[in-house]
């Protein structure tokens, strides 16, 4: 299972979380990566943890003030990027452009979608993976795998209908090892989560608990 920990803009210590991600990844069969704020990418990548950007823009080198260039996040140490997170939504054409920019720079891509209907469109952009995250469950602590298992199964089917090689992650409310196992049982190849680790009193313990049943 791929566990991608999105730190959003939570006021956690990104380096401490990244060191925990690195160590727990080393000691488990799961693949764990961390997506800090853009300003923290370099310090996080220096820990040796697999580091992802939260977003890249559909741009190339040039006159693009305030944008995030795919090559720039690679220079900072990122190996992959989220695209079209529910908190950083893009028009379809811009999501497409962001996937192309990420590919150009050699970044792995996860395109996010709110529901299974959007997953088909996300998969059609040709990313490495898609992630279904119902916005109403994000940050609630109620796991999508429990609250709405059909969302995960339908997303897996929708992606497979477009491209069986596109992996499907799920997210929203995931915080325990049981949630990760439930996601896997529904056909998900990984989970995307944030508050369960970033807001935990002890992020390292939260990560250890997540991978414990795997
Ligand atoms: O948006 C998410 C991950 O990108 C999910 O957030 P929570 O894990 O806090 O529900």
Image: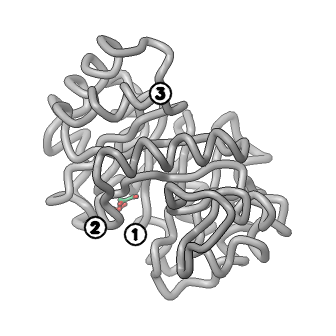
Report the Cα–Cα distance between label 1 and label 3: 28 Å
In percent of the image, x 36 and y 57: which residue is there? 85
Q: Is residue 62 above or below residue 112?
A: below
- Is residue 178 visible to us here? no
Ligand 1 closer than 8 Å to label 2 CB: yes
Comparing labels 2 and 3, the label whose residue is closer to the camera = 3
Residue wearing tag 3: 126
Mark 2 crowd level (few <14, some 14–19, many ≥20, 10 Å Cα): some
- How far is mark 1 from mark 2, CA to CA? 6 Å
The residue identified by callout 2 is 139
User: Disc 2 vs disc 3: Cβ atoms closer than 8 Å?
Assistant: no
Residue under circle 1? 195
Q: Quadrant of the C terminus?
A: top right
Q: Residue 187 carries which label?
A: none
Which of the 4 image quadrants contains residue 61? bottom right
**What separation in Å lies between label 2 and label 3 (alpha carbons)?**
28 Å
Circle 1 crowding by C-alpha within 10 Å: few under 14, some 14–19, many from 20: many
Residue 60 placed where, x, y %?
Answer: 63, 57
Residue drawn at x 28%, y 33% as measured from the top left: 119
Q: What element carries label 1?
A: helix
């Amino acid at each position: 299972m791929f566990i991608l920990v999105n730190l959003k803009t939570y006021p956690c210590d990104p380096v401490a979380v990244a060191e925990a991600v690195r160590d727990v990844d080393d000691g488990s069969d799961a693949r764990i990566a961390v997506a800090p704020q853009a300003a923290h990418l370099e310090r996080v990548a220096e820990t040796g943890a697999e580091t992802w950007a939260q977003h890249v823009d559909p741009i190339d080198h040039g006159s693009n003030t305030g944008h995030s260039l795919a090559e720039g996040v690679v220079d900072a140490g990122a190996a992959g990027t989220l695209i079209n997170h529910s908190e950083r939504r893009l028009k379809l054409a811009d999501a497409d452009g962001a996937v192309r920019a990420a590919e150009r720079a050699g970044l792995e891509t996860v395109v996010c979608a709110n529901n299974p209907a959007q997953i088909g469109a996300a998969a059609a952009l040709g990313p490495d993976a898609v992630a279904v995250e119902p916005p109403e469950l994000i940050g609630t602590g109620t796991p999508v795998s429990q609250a709405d298992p059909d969302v995960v199964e339908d997303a897996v089917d929708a992606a497979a209908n477009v491209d069986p090689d596109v992996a499907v992650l799920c997210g929203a409310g995931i915080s325990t090892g049981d949630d990760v196992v439930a996601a896997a049982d529904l056909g998900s190849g990984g989970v995307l989560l944030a508050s369960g680790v970033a807001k935990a009193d002890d992020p390292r313990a939260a990560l250890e608990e997540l991978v414990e049943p795997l």
